[in-house]
Amino acid sequence: MNVLVIGRGGREHSLIQKLAESDRVERLYAAPGNAGMTEQAECITIDEGNQEALVAFAKEKDIRLTIIGPEDPLAAGLADAFTKAGLPVFAPSGRAALIEGSKHFAKQLMKKYDIPTADYQAFTDADKAKAYIAEKGAPIVVKADGLAAGKGVVVAESAKEAEQAVEEMLGAGRFGEAGREVVIEEFLDGDEFSLMAFVRGGNVYPMVPARDHKRAFEGDQGPNTGGMGAYAPVPTLSRESYETALEMIVRPAANAMVEEDRSFTGVLYAGLIETKEGPKVIEFNARFGDPETQVVLPLLENDLVQVLLDVLDGKDPELTWKKQFCAGVVVASKGYPGSYDKGRLLPELKTDKSTFFVHAGTVLDEKGYVSNGGRVLLAGSLGGNTEEALDKAYRSLQVFDTFDDFFYRRDIGRSTLFSAGTEKHRT
């Protein structure tokens, strides 16, 4: 069959890489795609937001399966346009995508259905928000209600920092429409992890857990980004916590969406934290996580096309996973997540049987690959344990050490290795 992936980032390149392994794929397309995808897919210059053109292209090319990657077109109802046209699509409707598109909606849903999460209040008035901060004290978390490309969350260490975040969102309009309402949450202490699942209605098929690193700099310092690295599975996560997260959070969330007449089809992503009271929700996303996808899909033994078709047909895909670990480290443009230059030449990228590169913000010109975004690419590797996977990924990044236009965190996964001690090899 002909398959279409909509999006242009690392998540979509990782999907392309996995889909290309399938014997069921005749032609693989990406819209608009990026330079790294051209080795395995034909990139089409149609923007993710151009619903009419995407539907027309899918009809013209007899696309039998479409996967929508980014959150913005999901929230805008792109899946609905495909469904209305009678085109098979693996993605949630616009109504279902609200679980990511509005943090306030997600918190209301969790409260109604007793899904564990942080205490919160939502505000559209800056003065009332600041009064709430003064009442609760710091640390405290301020979130833009809508979609902000992973940058709309401020974990404030002081009341002053939290008030400044409120002023930037509600007063200065830093995130535009996405920041017209803010959600202020209790700070939760613990280790974070991500749990993605293939979902259709009340059917939930979980993936292996992963851990993402959101802060820009070593030691979890600096502003939040879209993610600077990840690894899977998580050796320090107990089986009990994993099962609790699945049975008390992910499955109830899927069932809650059915009850709310927002039945979910696609990948439901739960951003979670292990607390003393058990796992709690930090956020829900309505799609494959980025960069978690880049380290989870390489561990999947199944044919991804067959998995998606089975889920759409209401069948158990019977997921199986490699007895390995996968780690990935993001290379970003200097200045990210703030302002940065584009068009910077990348070094020559070399891979081996267990090492790979996933492109996120690159274009190809006569000189080679050049940067075209904040997060440029991810270096990933498989290994017998987390430490081995990380070491191989970092070795492949040594070619960047003499390039001043880029940076990457050198401590991805290191705290886990230290915490795990002799348990770091545990599956």
Image (tube, grey):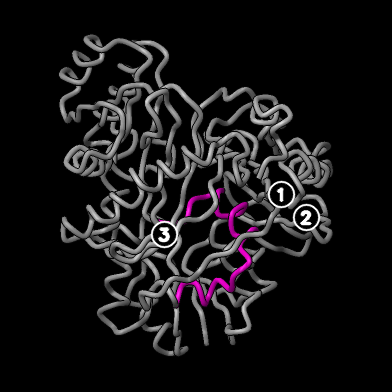
Q: Quadrant of the C terminus?
A: top right
Residue occupying the point 55% across, 45% down: 210
Q: Amino acid at mark 1?
A: Ala
Specify whether 95 is left or right of 68. left
Is residue 296 one of those drawn in magenta?
yes
> Mark 2 highlights which residue?
355
- Give me the C-alpha separation between circle 3 and circle 2: 26 Å
Name the residue type under label 2.
Answer: Thr
Nearest-to-viewer mark from 1 and 2: 2
User: Residue 304 colored magenta?
Assistant: yes
Q: Which residue is mark 3?
A: 267
Residue 173, percent from left and from top: 28, 33
**Residue 139: quarter of image:** top left
**Which residue type carries mark 3?**
Val
Q: Residue at x 33, y 26 (%)?
A: 142
Q: Nearer the viewer, residue 176 or 143?
A: 143
Is mark 1 in CB contact (under 8 Å) with mark 2? yes
Side of 190 where 254 appears, left or right: left
Q: Are marks 3 and 2 in contact (CB under 8 Å)?
A: no
User: Circle 1 is placed at which residue position?
Assistant: 379
Q: Earlier in the sequence, mark 3 or mark 1?
A: 3
Give 323 or 156, whichever is nearer the viewer: 323
User: Would residue 280 appear left or right of 107 to someone viewing this image?
Assistant: right
How far apart are the alpha carbons under marks 1 and 2? 7 Å
Residue at x 45%, y 61% (from the top left corner): 69
Where disc 2 sits, the SS reads strand
Residue 52 sits in which quadrant?
Answer: bottom left
Q: Residue furthest front?
A: 240
Q: Are marks 3 and 1 in contact (CB under 8 Å)?
A: no
Q: Is residue 325 above or below residue 368?
A: above
* Secondary structure state at the residue bearing disc 1: strand
Give the residues in magenta: 287-309
